[in-house]
């Protein structure tokens, strides 16, 4: 049987044969379906891109029904167990796990670019004391485009690699500076002797000690959280990165736009919403009452359900295990007991099970971040640091894909028909 789709247009009685590739048809093939030759042709209407593939990608694979997440074919569980973020970033960006020599070269290159230009420090100092760290972060990333004009040479392979190294290296420094600014502490310089995550903790929390030594459990927990957030297929911010990048702008500007998309409460701010929900519930004994309200449509169960996953988010399982290790060091987050009880009830209740509302990555990540000393305003910034690797990989894949052009969705016009202009003195 040929891989084609037969479509009969009942308006004309004409049948069209459209080729099927990878389980999809090309939307442009629908343009051949017309009533009259001078028509535009058939379009699809898909608000929020619920069932439209905008690209072909080799980076991340997700099977939401089975709870599978893979980077370049490697299961997320195996990467969280055996890899670290800097190695995972290499995998996402370049397609294969690095050899020992490649990893050493890559790690050293990133380490040597963690310093920020002094003017970026002045730029961040210009923000109000109570500025949101994410607003500072995306502004500073966008500002980097003015510091590195060579980044505009986007079709130069060597230039792209240099900008990639710069971005992976500098986003933790920007994030740490934003954090220190909001709490009124002096900026801390990078420590080249520490790991990627260890140095980030140093730039965040170092006080007067001669040298900051990150706690190994917290350092590893942060690294695992970075691995879990490094890429997630064509979500809102990644689509923004691709769409902005399709105009052939420099990667800093595109990444600032992706960060702005991540800023929203439905995306990077979702784990903050979980903590807010738990705080509003107040205590474990009030959970049944809260569940009853959710079922009545009077509230939302934050941190449960996902646009893609229709079973337990594989990242949530890993984070839940990591939470136990973190809380042994920091002491239990007082909201943890409520979170565990909420999860237990939701996983047993037919109302939530039938709707496939399982815990997602945001349900436990916020509890860990809070226990480690991060204010909720830092949560989307902590998301943006690792996601930078995925954004750049997706951007480069888009640039080198011959099928891609500048993004320009169609619309269905529902406004007024053509009409004549009426002078101001004659309008009613």
Image (cartoon, rainbow, N blue to C red):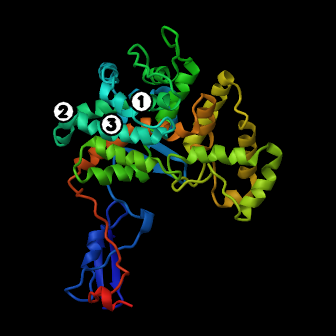
Q: Residue at x 39, y 63 (%)?
A: 52
Q: Quadrant of the N terminus?
A: bottom left
| Residue 82 percent coordinates (x, y) | 49, 26
Mark 1 vs 3, N-terminal side: 3
Q: Residue at x 50, y 50 (%)?
A: 267
- Which residue is more in the foreground, 426 or 163? 426
Q: Would you name the residue on which mark 3 appears?
A: 93
Q: Would you name the residue on which mark 2 appears?
A: 158
- Helix, strand, or loop for circle 1? helix
| Residue 40 percent coordinates (x, y) | 24, 80
- Which residue is more in the foreground, 353 or 175? 175
Q: Nearer the viewer, mark 1 or mark 3?
A: 1
- Which residue is more in the foreground, 70 or 267? 267
Q: CA distance from mark 1 to mark 3?
A: 18 Å
- Helix, strand, or loop for circle 3? helix
Residue 88 showing in the rendered view: no
Q: Quadrant of the C terminus?
A: bottom left
Query: Crowding near pointer 3: few (<14 within 10 Å), some, many (20+)?
Result: many
Q: Residue at x 26, y 39 (%)?
A: 145
- Judged left or right of residue 238, residue 342 is right
Q: Is 210 above or below relative to 99?
A: above
């Amino acid at each position: 049987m040929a891989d084609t789709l037969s479509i009969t247009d009942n308006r004309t009685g004409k049948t069209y044969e459209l080729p099927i590739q990878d389980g999809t048809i090309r939307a442009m093939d629908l343009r051949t379906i017309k009533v009259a030759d001078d028509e535009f042709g058939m379009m699809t209407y898909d608000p929020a891109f619920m069932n439209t593939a905008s690209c072909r990608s080799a980076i991340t694979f997700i099977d939401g029904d089975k709870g599978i997440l893979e980077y370049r074919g490697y299961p997320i569980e195996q990467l969280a167990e055996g890899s670290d973020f800097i190695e995972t970033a290499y995998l996402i960006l370049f397609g294969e796990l690095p050899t020992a020599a490649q990893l050493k070269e890559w790690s050293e290159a990133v380490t040597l670019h963690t310093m920020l230009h002094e003017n970026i420090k002045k730029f961040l100092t210009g923000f109000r004391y109570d500025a949101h760290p994410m607003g500072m972060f995306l502004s500073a990333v966008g500002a980097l485009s003015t510091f590195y004009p060579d980044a505009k040479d986007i079709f130069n392979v060597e230039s792209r690699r240099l900008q990639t190294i710069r971005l992976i290296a500098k986003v933790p420094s920007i994030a740490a500076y934003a954090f220190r600014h909001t709490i009124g502490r002096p900026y801390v310089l990078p420590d080249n002797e520490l790991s990627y995550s260890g140095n980030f903790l140093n730039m965040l929390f170092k006080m007067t000690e001669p040298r900051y030594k990150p706690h190994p459990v917290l350092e590893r927990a942060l690294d695992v959280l970075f691995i879990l957030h490094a890429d997630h297929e064509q979500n809102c911010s990644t689509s923004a990165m691709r769409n902005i990048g399709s105009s052939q702008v420099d990667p800093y500007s595109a990444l600032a736009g992706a960060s702005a998309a991540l800023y929203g409460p439905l995306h990077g701010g979702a784990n903050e919403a979980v903590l807010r929900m738990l705080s509003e519930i107040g205590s474990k004994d009030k959970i049944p009452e809260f569940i009853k309200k959710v079922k009545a449509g009077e509230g939302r169960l934050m941190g449960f359900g996902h646009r893609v996953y229709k079973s337990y988010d594989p990242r949530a399982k890993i984070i839940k295990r990591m939470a136990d290790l973190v809380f042994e060091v920091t002491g239990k987050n007082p909201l943890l007991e409520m979170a565990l009880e909420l999860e237990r009830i939701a996983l047993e209740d037919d109302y939530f099970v039938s709707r496939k509302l399982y815990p997602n990555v945001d349900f436990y990540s916020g509890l860990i971040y809070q226990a480690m000393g991060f204010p909720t305003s830092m949560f989307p910034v902590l998301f943006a640091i690792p996601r930078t690797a995925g954004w750049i990989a997706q951007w480069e894949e888009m640039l080198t894909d011959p099928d891609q052009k500048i993004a320009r969705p169609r619309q269905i016009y529902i406004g007024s028909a053509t009409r004549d202009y009426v002078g101001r003195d004659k309008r009613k």
